[in-house]
Image (cartoon, helix red, strand yellow):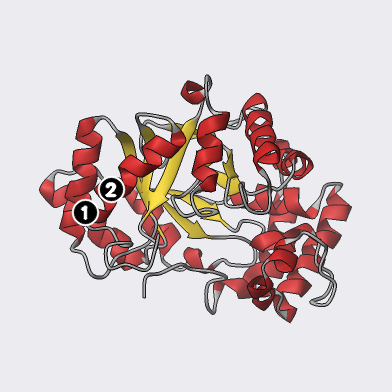
């Protein structure tokens, strides 16, 4: 496994990270625990979750799986998206974040987080309040580094400027939807992160599985897949994304690898990307993703991937999560 710095921070993370959105939902408890332990055995140290994944089950399962090996991983969770329907159940106010941090620590069975991420920008809370709250968390020893997620470029730059002005810890990373099927971060976010030393953590790196080749047509949905268990996901199965999946599949065959590994390797080769988090519902899927770590792409392959995905730099993001 290769390890990289998270942005310009001193924290090193595995080139491939484990996303746990499916744990406790599309992957049961034992399958999830098996994947965590397999990932650690393979050198994956970055484990990403959130306080709302599978209700709270993702955090609870991770906490159980990491008993005795917590010190071997970089553990990160998120808060900010709704946990309920009440007026205090979302956002990045001091009240909400302080409460959610304690709940996450309890579920994860740990007394600190390596990285604590704000799940999305909160238009109703001053950034100064959010950043001072995060500063207090770092000072308490309960949080080591802080990151953002689903921020627009101007929001991230404003936060960095406030941190610099007030002498507060800066966001070390930004989690954003980024893949061959969504290159919109390259318009503003990637240049900003390169300039400011912020590490990018792509989510949906395989466009929800579309770039693995598992979806041939909108009507052909494999049993147990995301589109099968979550009908709302079918909205992503557009003609242009499906065509991209086919093109990536043909190139992967020519290179002698899988479409998923090729897509992940492309992301790992992009500037500012620190770690790529992949989800899985079984160990065999994680095995396929691990092939990307040692896959070296030559200039011709990178140029062809750039060509077939060029149109995805325009238009709307593949996915984004915001407070309404």
Image quadrant for the N terminus? top right
Residue 152 visible: yes
| Residue hosting label 2 | 99
Q: Please, which residue is most extreme toward the top here?
A: 68
231, above or below 111, in the image: below
Q: How many marks?
A: 2
Taking 142 as reference, is 47 left or right? Answer: right
Taking 78 as reference, is 42 left or right? Answer: right
What residue sits 40% from the left and 29% below the top?
110
Q: Secondary structure at mark 1?
A: helix
243, above or below 33, in the image: below
Taking 201 as reference, is 207 left or right? Answer: right
Spatial CA distance of label 2 from label 1 is 6 Å
Residue 317 position in % (x across, y down): 53, 72
Of residues 231 and 260, which is closer to you in this image? 231
Residue 151 position in % (x across, y down): 37, 63
Q: Quadrant of residue 172?
A: top left
Q: Please, which residue is most extreme toward the left here?
A: 166
| Residue hosting label 1 | 95
Image quadrant for the C terminus? bottom left
- Callout 2 touching callout 1 (CB < 8 Å): yes
Q: Quadrant of residue 310?
A: bottom right
202, above or below 142, in the image: below
């Amino acid at each position: 496994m290769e390890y990289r710095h998270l942005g310009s921070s001193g924290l090193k993370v595995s080139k491939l990270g484990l996303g746990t959105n499916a744990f406790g939902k599309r992957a049961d408890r034992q399958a999830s625990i098996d994947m965590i332990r397999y990932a650690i055995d393979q050198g994956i140290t970055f484990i990403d979750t959130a306080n709302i994944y599978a209700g709270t089950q993702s955090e609870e399962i991770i906490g159980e799986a990491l008993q005795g090996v917590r010190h071997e991983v970089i553990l990160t969770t998120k808060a900010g998206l709704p946990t309920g329907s009440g007026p205090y159940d979302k956002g990045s106010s001091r009240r909400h974040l302080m409460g959610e941090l304690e709940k996450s620590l309890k579920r994860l069975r740990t007394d600190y987080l390596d990285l604590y991420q704000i799940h999305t920008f909160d238009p109703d809370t001053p950034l100064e309040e959010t950043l001072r709250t995060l500063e207090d968390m770092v000072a308490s020893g309960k949080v080591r580094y802080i990151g953002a997620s689903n921020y627009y470029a101007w929001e991230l730059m404003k936060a960095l400027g406030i941190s610099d002005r007030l002498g507060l810890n800066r966001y070390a990373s930004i989690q954003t939807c980024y893949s061959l099927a969504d290159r919109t971060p390259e318009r503003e976010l990637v240049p900003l992160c390169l300039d400011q030393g912020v590490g990018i953590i792509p989510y949906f790196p395989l466009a929800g599985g579309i770039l693995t080749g598992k979806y041939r047509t909108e009507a052909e949905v494999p049993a147990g897949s995301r589109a099968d268990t979550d009908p709302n996901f079918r909205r992503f199965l557009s003609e242009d994304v499906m065509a991209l999946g086919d093109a990536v599949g043909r190139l992967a065959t020519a290179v002698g690898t899988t479409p998923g590994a090729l897509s992940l390797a492309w992301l790992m080769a992009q500037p500012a990307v620190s770690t790529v988090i992949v989800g899985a519902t079984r160990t065999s899927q994680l095995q396929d993703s691990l092939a990307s770590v040692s896959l070296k792409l030559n200039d011709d392959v990178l140029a062809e991937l750039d060509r077939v995905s060029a149109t995805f730099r325009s238009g709307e993001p593949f996915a984004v999560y915001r407070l309404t």
